[in-house]
């Protein structure tokens, strides 16, 4: 597929809105319309060599899904379809939503599980993001002092989101676009 694929999970709609902002900033020439992961099959995801994937954070130490209290299926229900999948050659950038005030002890924690899901199957994960500008105690989504993807807080820092997306996209698109056929 000669465009970037954008897929997201969501429960209350914030991650969908962020995915739409990312799509809008990238433009239709470079990306296809974002798709909810609960309406996606594996073949659809695998047709992309460049992916931007987003998740909210729910539950402790897991991907969001029905077992974390989400009303609809989410990444947790999609994950088993990736069992045995070979994702080598795919460039993947991740973004995660969370609430740093209310969940300061596990801010954006679900993002690490999305990271592992794709990294452990051979995908090249790009787009790490600085922890500067956030205030939290602990986050599983931090490796070597950086978040494994763009982290956004629509509850306490919504005014920073558009600028963060802009900076992040400027960093990742030079890596995503060359893998497009
Ligand atoms: C029950 C519940 C659990 C949550 N758990 C976490 C969490 O562990 N870490 C975190 O950073 N945010 C947590 N959040 C905040 C959500 O991730 C945040 O509000 C996000 O923007 C929701 O995205 P969505 O609207 O796409 O579902 C939680 C919210 C709720 C309601």
Image: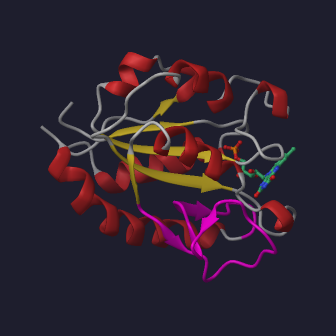
Q: Which residue is at the front of the view, 55 or 155?
A: 55
Tell me the quarter of the picture where residue 138 sits: bottom right
Image position of 179 (left or right of 91): left
The residue depicted at 84 percent of the width and 69 percent of the height is: 101
Image position of 107 (left or right of 158): right
State whether the magenta stretch is mostly helix, strand or loop: loop
Seen in the picture, residue 111 relative to 62 is either above or below; the reply is below
Tell me the quarter of the picture where residue 151 sits: bottom right
Residue found at the far left of this picture:
181
* Quadrant of image for the C terminus: top left
**Residue 102 magenta:** no
Seen in the picture, residue 94 relative to 63 is either above or below; the reply is below
The stretch in magenta equals 127-156
Figure colour scheme:
secondary structure
* Quadrant of image for the N terminus: top left
The residue depicted at 83 percent of the width and 43 percent of the height is: 59
* Residue 49 screen position, x and y as percent: 27, 37
**Residue 131 magenta:** yes
* Residue 35 screen position, x and y as percent: 47, 30
* Residue 166 screen position, x and y as percent: 39, 68
The residue depicted at 62 percent of the width and 31 percent of the height is: 75
């Amino acid at each position: 597929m000669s465009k970037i694929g954008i897929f997201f999970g969501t429960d209350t709609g914030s991650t969908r809105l962020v995915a739409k902002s990312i799509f809008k900033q990238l433009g239709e020439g470079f990306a296809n319309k974002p798709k909810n992961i609960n309406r996606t099959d594996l073949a659809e995801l695998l047709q992309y060599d460049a992916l931007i994937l987003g998740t909210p954070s729910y539950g402790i130490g897991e991907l969001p899904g029905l077992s974390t209290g989400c009303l609809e299926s989410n990444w947790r229900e999609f994950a088993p379809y990736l069992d045995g999948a070979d994702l080598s050659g795919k460039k993947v950038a991740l973004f995660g939503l969370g609430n740093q005030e209310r969940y300061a002890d596990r801010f954006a924690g679900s993002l690490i599980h999305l990271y592992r899901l794709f990294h452990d199957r051979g995908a090249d994960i790009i787009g790490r993001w600085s922890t500067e500008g956030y205030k939290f105690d602990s986050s599983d989504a931090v490796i070597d002092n950086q978040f494994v993807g763009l982290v956004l807080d629509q509850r306490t820092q919504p005014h920073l989101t558009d600028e963060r997306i802009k900076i992040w996209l400027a960093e990742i698109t030079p890596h995503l676009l060359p893998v497009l056929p």
